[in-house]
Structures are given as structure tokens and as C-alpha cells.
Image (spheres, grey):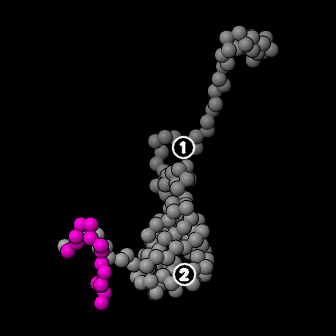
Amino acid sequence: MSKRDLAHDLFQSYKTGFTKKKKVIEERTQTPGDPTLIANVLSDLIQQRDWDSGLAEGTLFATWAQVVGPEISQHTTPLSMLDGRLLVQCSSTAWATQLNLVGPSLLEKIRSSAPGALVESLDFIGPQAPSWKRGLRTISNGRGPRDTYG
């Protein structure tokens, strides 16, 4: 492009407010019809959509028994992961209390085995108590259980 053509383009763009877009030439390593490995496609998709932490959390839930050990995994179930807090339900309140005491060492174990999971803290809860609001022998607007356990 000569200096005169460049000056003419600048004048036209100033006059009309329109600039020419330069063509961007992309180099393709493969043609669109070439086969690619599914592992490459999935890894690209995971990186593009920023699914790394979610995938690591799913892996943590799937491999819970290997991460915490067989004894702890028999009495615990990971329920949810929200804002870096892993909620774990225990089979009894005694297990929840004991795991609260060894929580920091268990947290380090989880962080080392699942580094992408971004677990910041652990919350242990006991089993769900029975509901007295529904069932065969409930009374609407009743006072609830009083002397149920003797």
C-alpha cells in the first residue's frame, strides 16, 4: 500500500467514520474434518468453560472412600460443597464430634489428594432426627412430642 493510498483511506475514514477492518489470518493446524482425540476435545472444553474446580469436587465425592480411608468412609457421606465449605453427614453425633476434633488433619488430607477441589473448611453434622410434623399419628396444631422417650 502506497503512502497516497494510506492517506486516502485515512481521509475516507475520517470523513465517513468507517474504518476498514483488517483481515486476520488464522493458522489452522488441522482441517475441520480431521479426526481428533476425544480426550483432547474434553480437556479443551473443560478449560474453556472453567470446569476444573467442579470436576475436582466431583472426583472428591466419587473417591471419598480412598481419600479419607475405609473406617471414616463407612460412617460419613459428603453431602454438598458450597463456597469452599464441605458438608459431611455422619452416622452418629459421636462420629461428628470426633471428626470435628480431627478436622484439620482430615482437611489437609483432602487438600493433598484433591488439590483442585478448593476445600477451605469442613462441617460435620449428625444424622437427621425423625420428623414429628408428618406421619400416621400426628395432630394438626399439636404441641409435639412430650413424654415420647420415657
Q: Secondary structure at mark 1?
A: loop
The x and y percentages for residue 50 are 55, 53
Residue picked out by circle 1 = 30
* Mark found first going from the N terminus, 1 or 2: 1
CA–CA distance in space, label 1 to label 2: 54 Å
| Residue 82 belongs to magenta span | no
Rendered view: 39 above or below 25:
below
Rendered-image quadrant of the N terminus: top right
| Residue 140 belongs to magenta span | yes
The x and y percentages for residue 10 are 75, 14
Residue picked out by circle 2 = 100
Q: Nearer the viewer, mark 1 or mark 2?
A: 2
> What is the total number of numbered labels drawn onto the structure image?
2
Q: Can you see residue 63?
A: no
Could you classify mark 2 by the number of other residues whose Cα lies within 10 Å: few (under 14), some (14-19), or many (20 or more)?
Answer: some
Q: Look at 49% across and 40% down and name the residue there.
A: 32
* Extreme residue in the left direction: 136
Rendered view: 24 above or below 31:
above
The x and y percentages for residue 48 are 55, 49
Q: Look at 30% across and 90% down and name the residue there.
A: 150
Image position of 21 (left or right of 41): right
Q: Please state the extent of the stretch shown in magenta in the rendering.
A: 137-150
Residue type at numbered disc 2: Asn
Residue type at numbered disc 1: Gln
Image position of 62 (left or right of 47): left
Could you classify mark 1 by the number of other residues whose Cα lies within 10 Å: few (under 14), some (14-19), or many (20 or more)?
Answer: few
Of 37 and 59, nearer the camera is 59
Residue 24, quarter of picture: top right
Q: Look at 53% across and 50% down and name the residue there.
A: 49
